[in-house]
Amino acid sequence: MTLGNKLRSLRAVEGSLRGLGRPMTQQELTKAMKREVGRGLSQAYLSQIESGARPHLTHGTRTLLARFFRVYPGFLVDDPEGYTPELQSSLRVVDAKIDSWLYAAAEQFAADPELHRGLLAVAEHEDSRKALLLLAEILRTPGLADRLGEVLHSGKPQGSGHPPPANSRNN
């Protein structure tokens, strides 16, 4: 996992811990750091770190972020390629990457409320990987996505598309 992904994940966890129901924004993070730790980073600098434009942190920045997030400073580095902690399964690492990607995407599409809510809903699902795989199967099944869309947008259940049983046709 990259340093940027770790910071996005930490913002997501912090937002959840603070009862926001969403990741903290970079701006919220910088304000909270100044208020709670007494010093902070600029939103622009944090954005550069998360995007990978600044792949290395100074000792002071690493210490400040570690103190705010209450993590070991050594956690705030890129993991080596293929690295996985022994106690995590590789699937769990994939799930964390998916969730991190979904939270980052939701933040990027904050101007589109429906898409933002949709991405957050998948990210916050107990098994976001399974939810994405289900979506893929829905899209691969001819006509299913359109039919589900009709049912969901109508606000009321509709028939199955099959004729009613013979004994109920003349009633």
Image: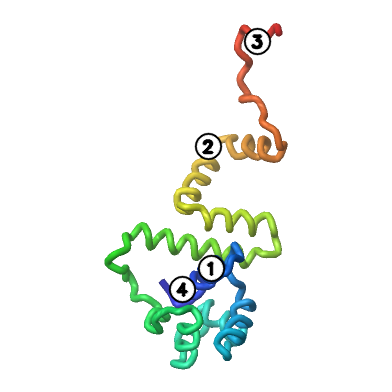
Q: Position of residue 29 (x, y in %)?
A: 59, 78
The CA span between labels 2 and 3 is: 30 Å
x, y (%) of residue 170? 70, 6
Q: Give the spatial CA distance, label 2 vs label 4.
A: 36 Å
In front of the other: 39 or 49: 39
* Identity, as a three-letter code, of the amino acid under mark 1: Leu
Disc 4 secondary structure class: helix
Callout 4: 10 Å neighbours few (<14), some, many (20+)? Answer: many
Where does the image place residue 78, in percent across and percent down from the top left?
A: 40, 78
Which residue occupies the extreme left position in the image?
86
* Residue 117, label in figure: none
Report which residue position mark 4 lands on: 6
> Which residue type carries mark 4?
Lys
Residue type indicated by callout 3: Ser
Residue 141 disc label: 2
Q: CA distance from mark 1 to mark 3?
A: 54 Å
Residue 24 percent location from the top left of the image: 59, 71
Q: What residue does disc 3 label? A: 168
